[in-house]
Amino acid sequence: MINLVRTKNPMPEQAPQTRIQNFEEVCQGYTEDMAVREAMRCLRCRTKPCMNKGCPTHIHIPDFIAKVAEGDFEAAYKIIQETSCLSPICSRVCPHENQCEGSCVHGIKGQPVAIGSLERFVSDWHAAHHPEEIQEMTPASSNGHKAAVIGAGPAGMSCAGDLANKGYQVTGYETLDVAGGILSYGIPAFRLPKDIVGKQIDMLKAKGVTFVTGSVVGKDCTIDDLINKEGFEAVFIGTGAEVPTSMHVPGEELPGVYTANDFLMKINIDKAYLPEKAGLLPHADKIVIVGGGNVAMDAARCAARMGASKVTVVYRRSREEMPACDAEINEAMAEQIEFCYLTNPVAIKAGPDGRVCKMECIKMQLGEPDASGRRRPVPIEGSNYEMETDCVIMAIGTKMDSIVTGTTPDLATDKYGCIVTDENAATNRPGIFAGGDNVTGPLTVVKAMKAGRTAAAAMDAYISGKSKAQQ
Ligand SMILES: Cc1cc2nc3c(=O)[nH]c(=O)nc-3n(C[C@H](O)[C@H](O)[C@H](O)COP(=O)(O)OP(=O)(O)OC[C@H]3O[C@@H](n4cnc5c(N)ncnc54)[C@H](O)[C@@H]3O)c2cc1C
Ligand code: SF4
């Protein structure tokens, strides 16, 4: 029976006043009843726009939803697993409004089916009913071949997982002391609990993947070392695009000014919010975040949870052009975060103690559209004013690091420093593959996951082809 209600079954969540006191997950997930009721809203459209047009990894959405409606949650999980290896993560962080739910026909006259919430329910239901899953995992039987994966973000994790499933001996090299990439250090725990990321990493280890953490490829060794000295037959580069860009305004180097990456890393990895870690991030009362994307929203929402009395997002265009998802902006607004649109910093100023105490801003107006298609922000001369602040977080974007590309002779890159690949994630250097943000520039978790899986298939074909030729 189809449920003709036009609105989504809302997912229970912590109230804004409660949640800004903690780093626990905001959304609390559907119950079985809620999930079944929501699943019954699906019309099982013949053309499956949610799956074919919306989902970058083409999860069989109407099929898994049909299983949820029947109450067969394990069957639903198996359908999702056919195409997604990170569903507990993607169901929480994918920008569903622009992907599957953005293509759902229900969205034409009402709200789309809550596909992300259903995917999350199914993944969590499976985890809750299979607590022994990791202990029962064993590595696939060895095929006698070795592959290396550089970077343990979603691209590297999915590539490593698929290769391990095929019997490869996989070694993952990771700069940080923990695997997970942005899933571990960037996305806050109130959106993506860290035990969920940890479990995916433990699953990879149970499948036989070895992680060498604290190892910077390009500094501690090179890709050519991995191939020529360590005997890896193929290498995947999944190093992301994590170098923060600078605004080049005076005062950016002052104590109390952070890049969003540094600020989020101190919270997510070093757990600066725990009382015993007090001092890792000096207390700040009036925190300003510069930027308008999802990273800015994450930084602002963390700032609110760190006890600031006022958190302001400063963005140079208007709300309409803001790249952050609506859901993220709305959650931030509910958490009393203020938005100062059409405003741009021109200088950050220090107080007598040498720390940041003010930010000078200029008001902007929108001109003609620029190359991005959004209206260009133009400064209004003479509109400068000062804003009091004791902490500024810059969330204005990131770019590629050149440490790997710069130490890999002849590896082709584009004008932005991104690695150039074909549609199978192969670079111009035989045996070297790449995918994720370091190829596309900063994008999404699901796209990085998909790229890692594409690369794993291509690496398998490359190594198998080579060994057949040698027989
Ligand atoms: C704060 C924040 C919030 C985000 N929120 C979302 C969201 O809600 N939804 C969404 O879909 N996307 C989100 N994104 C984007 C998403 O996280 C990225 O697109 C995705 O993580 C890219 O995956 P990746 O594997 O290519 O790179 P990364 O996740 O960046 O992982 C790359 C890994 O490589 C390692 N590495 C780098 N250089 C080397 C080296 N030389 N040697 C060894 N290891 C190296 C890094 O330490 C890192 O662990 C967010 C990004 C940020 C910063
Ligand atoms: S587009 Fe919406 S209603 Fe149609 S099959 Fe997909 S989820 Fe169901």
Image: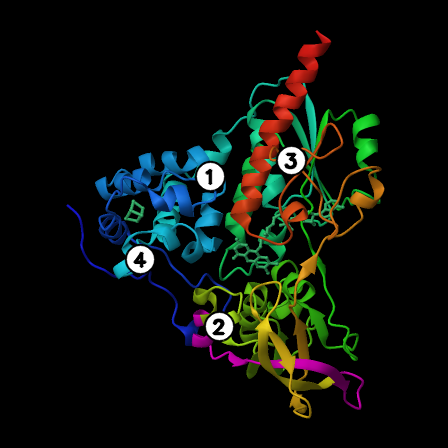
Distance CA(mark 2)–CA(mark 3):
35 Å
The residue to which callout 4 is attached is 107
Amino acid type of the residue tagged 2 in the rendering: Glu
The residue to which callout 1 is attached is 84
Distance CA(mark 2)–CA(mark 1):
32 Å
Q: Earlier in the sequence, mark 4 or mark 1?
A: 1
- Residue 33 located within the stretch drawn in magenta: no
- Secondary structure at badge 1 equals loop
* As drawn, 41 above or below 292: above
The label on residue 320 is 2
**Which region shows up in magenta?**
330-355
Distance CA(mark 3)–CA(mark 4):
35 Å
Distance CA(mark 1)–CA(mark 3):
22 Å
Amino acid type of the residue tagged 1 in the rendering: Ser
Amino acid type of the residue tagged 4 in the rendering: Gly
Density class for disc 2 (Cα within 10 Å; few <14, some 14-19, many ≥20) is few
The residue to which callout 3 is attached is 422
Please state which of residues 29 and 132 is positioned toward the viewer in this rendering: 29
